[in-house]
Image: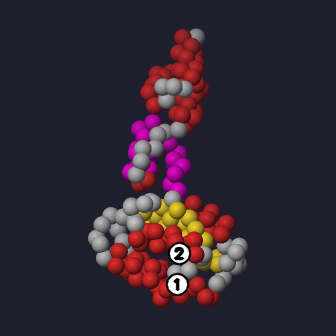
Amino acid sequence: MFAGHSLGGLTVVYSFVSRPDLFNAYIAASPVLHYDNDYVIKRAEELFKQKKDWKRTMFVGLGNEPDYQKGFNSFRDLLKKTNPKGFEYEFREFKEDNHASVVLPAYYAGLRKIFAGWNPPQIGSVSELENHYKKLSERFGYKILIPENTLNQIGYQFLQAKQFVEAIDVFKKNTQIYPNSANVYDSLADAYEKRRST
């Protein structure tokens, strides 16, 4: 992920249009997109003529800054017009903020955009959880494992419901994913002990 503000925001967008393979997510807060006669926007227009699946996310935030509005609008309109495949983007104006105060709300909103869908929905089964993290892995371009504590929580829910076979299966899966964690073996032992004492 690459984030920047003002000229740093311009650098973020420039980085994407000149070397789109460097990062998979971008946050530009009040970028100076009109710099050098809209150079970056023109580069973006050329770049998006390539028909490819981008698998990239960009968030562009702007404070109440009339001097930056034209570049912001031009870039937003270009993305709406070209609608690049696999390129998720959001443009948001923060009218209550100025050039200096927009940084934190724009970064926060950008992170929310980039990581939207990170938390799993209410999970009914481990296979649904595996599917959720498989999709996240595909989206972000690297393997994302089911968190150890998430599997542990599911295992203990099965234990409380006296579903020992299911609990043991979940805890075993946790030992496969996290073989160096003492906690996963402790939880598996809890399940075996509770099954034996019932």
Q: Is residue 42 above or below residue 128?
A: below
Mark 1 and mark 2 in contact (Cβ < 8 Å)? yes
x and y percentages locating residue 111 in the rendered image: 57, 60
At horizontal 42% and vertical 40% (from top left) the residue drawn is 130
x and y percentages locating residue 108 in the rendered image: 63, 63
| One can see residue 158 in this view | no
Label 1 crowding class (10 Å Cα cut-off): few <14, some 14-19, many 20+?
some
- The number of discs equals 2
**What distance separates the C-alpha of mark 2 from that of mark 1?**
8 Å
| One can see residue 143 in this view | yes
What amino acid type should be assigned to the residue bearing mark 2? Leu
Circle on res. 130: none
At horizontal 58% and vertical 68% (from top left) the residue drawn is 4
At mark 2, the secondary structure is: helix
Query: Which one is nearer the viewer's eye here, 83 or 13?
Result: 13
At horizontal 53% and vertical 38% (from top left) the residue drawn is 147
Highlighted range, magenta: 115-138
Using residue 63 as the reference point, say whether residue 70 is left or right of it. Answer: left
Query: Which one is nearer the viewer's eye here, 172 or 100?
Result: 100
Outermost residue on the left side: it is 51
What amino acid type should be assigned to the residue bearing mark 1? Tyr
At horizontal 60% and vertical 71% (from top left) the residue drawn is 5
Sequence order check, earlier mark of 2 and 1: 2
At mark 1, the secondary structure is: helix
Q: Which residue is mark 1?
A: 35
Q: Which residue is mark 2?
A: 10
x and y percentages locating residue 173 in the rendered image: 45, 28
